[in-house]
Amino acid sequence: MSELTTNTVLLAYENSFKLLDLDTGVVSGLTVYYAEPPFDMEYPIPSGGGLWVKAEPGGGTWFMSNGKCLVFCNHTGAANRILGTQISVSAVAENASRLYLGGVSTYWFQTPYWADVFAHWQAMQASSSTVHDDMGAPNNMVFWSGLGGDSQDHPYLLFLTMLGVFGPYMFNELRADILAAVESGVIGMRPMTTTGPVVALAGHGDRMNVYGQRGIAALVQDAQGAWGEIPVLGMGIKGRGAVAGTKTRHVFADTYGTLWLYQLGEGVRRLGYEQILAIQDPKKTIISHDPELDEYWISDGITTYLLTPNGMGGPITTAPSGLVRDQKHRLIGAVTNASDGNKHVKLTTNAHNMGVQDMKHIGLVQFSMYGIGGGDTPLASTPVCWIEWQDSDGTFKAGFSDPVNADGVSFPHTSFRDARVAMEGWAENEDARIWGVQLRYNAEGKTYIRGTLPTKLENADE
């Protein structure tokens, strides 16, 4: 799903595209044409593709890929038509008006046209450690266009033609310009040495983060124009859709289901929650970001969890594959499995140490909640609460669980330095919610504090 204007949204299905008018609610079909002159033959979107990822440089130009084909609209002599091409692209992104593609696979890499381009690139990179001998483009390669597509009249034309999008005839027509752009560094490419096969791309400040199967790295350009690679994490992500966020903050799930926060200028920080997300299907895990509430919906189409600024909640039945906000600030999403009757609720807050590094002991937890009961059996007639304390290696371990009584109070006696509160129950109706957690704890460390200290962990509605 991709927002086109203030009152229309592009809906991407497995084999088709449609346009939703937000004012009238009317959905109309859109035709996709082959991306080869004269741009008048209908292009059948191949079946079997996965999540559609998008890049929108602006000015009505956009690019989308489902891992099996590239569909785009960039006013390249095709009367604003939507064009499709049989080029497999795992990742597509935009940053500072550059278009980036990663994990590219196409027959074009076996042709003499690409051999011509590749030889010129190798010669330009002769003194660089980034050169490799394979004439093809391996799946750890990232390509990027010139700023603004290097043209006001025909943006991204040279870049796309270099990759065979418009076919041999167009390449021969523009060969000299393409080779000049490659030799001058206007169009760039680089094999990533630490990421393995490229899975996803996401702009992060003035850099492009490259998320691979085996690691994460930042692709950066220095003041002299040279491009370099900065390793970020020696672990890959769960799948093509397992990262989302803004230009300054990314949230991603690694191959083990552990959730991470990557804040620009601060590096990566482990959030955890692997005991929840490890069960999700890696090929289907999608993280969707709601920028207005700064919430992340994490779903594989079967189970969905909601990460808020105060912690993780779920599972919930709504399973979004994409989210946008319209001009009226309404949250619009493409969803599956929205009414399967699942009422199981589990809440986990962020980790806290109450501003004290010494040992503490929680004696009481009280939830402000409505409509949360126990399970549907006599053995689980009330919600239960437990404390997950953080070990020295960064992992969280669950303490003893305790029932939550009718007043929302539980007594999960657990000692900790850093810990988070977890609660599990059953939604008695569709309006069930949890909006606050209060703790009482005693200090056990060398710095003794008399009495008990109250603290409040705000939490999002469920």
Image: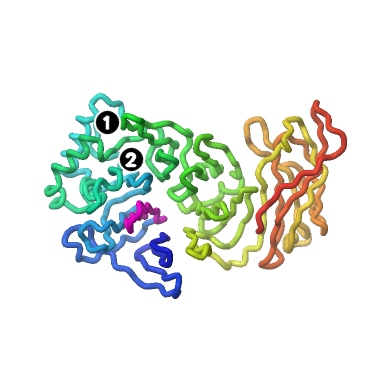
Kindly identify the amino acid type of the residue bearing the numbered disc 1.
His
Q: Is mark 2 on a helix, strand or loop?
A: strand
Q: Residue 205 appears in which quarter of the rendering?
A: top left
Q: Which colour scheme is used?
A: rainbow
Residue closest to the eye, 305 or 229: 229
Q: Which residue is drawn at 42% across and 36% down?
A: 218
- x, y percent for residue 197: 37, 40
Depth check, mark 1 against mark 2: the one in front is 2
Find the residue positioned furthest to the top.
127
Q: Mark 2 points at which residue?
A: 142
Q: Which residue is drawn at 17% across and 44% down?
A: 111
Does residue 170 show up magenta in the picture?
no
Q: Earlier in the sequence, mark 1 or mark 2?
A: 1
What is the quadrant of the C terminus in the image? bottom right
Q: Residue 133 appears in which quarter of the rendering?
A: top left
- x, y percent for residue 349: 67, 47
Q: Residue 20 appears in which quarter of the rendering?
A: bottom left
Is 250 displayed left or right of 274 in the figure? left
Query: What number is the disc on residue 380?
Result: none
Q: Which residue is drawn at 29% across and 68% down?
A: 31
Residue closest to the eye, 297 or 450: 450
Q: Distance between the residues labelled 1 and 2?
A: 14 Å
Give the magenta range: 51-66
Query: What number is the disc on residue 132?
Result: 1
Q: Which residue is drawn at 79% across and 29% down?
A: 445
Q: Main secondary structure of the magenta part?
A: strand
- x, y percent for residue 50: 40, 56
Residue closest to the eye, 235 or 209: 209
What is the quadrant of the N terminus in the image? bottom left
Mark 2: few/some/many CA within 10 Å (<14, 14-19, 20+): many
Find the residue positioned furthest to the front.
152
Is 428 displayed left or right of 76 in the figure? right
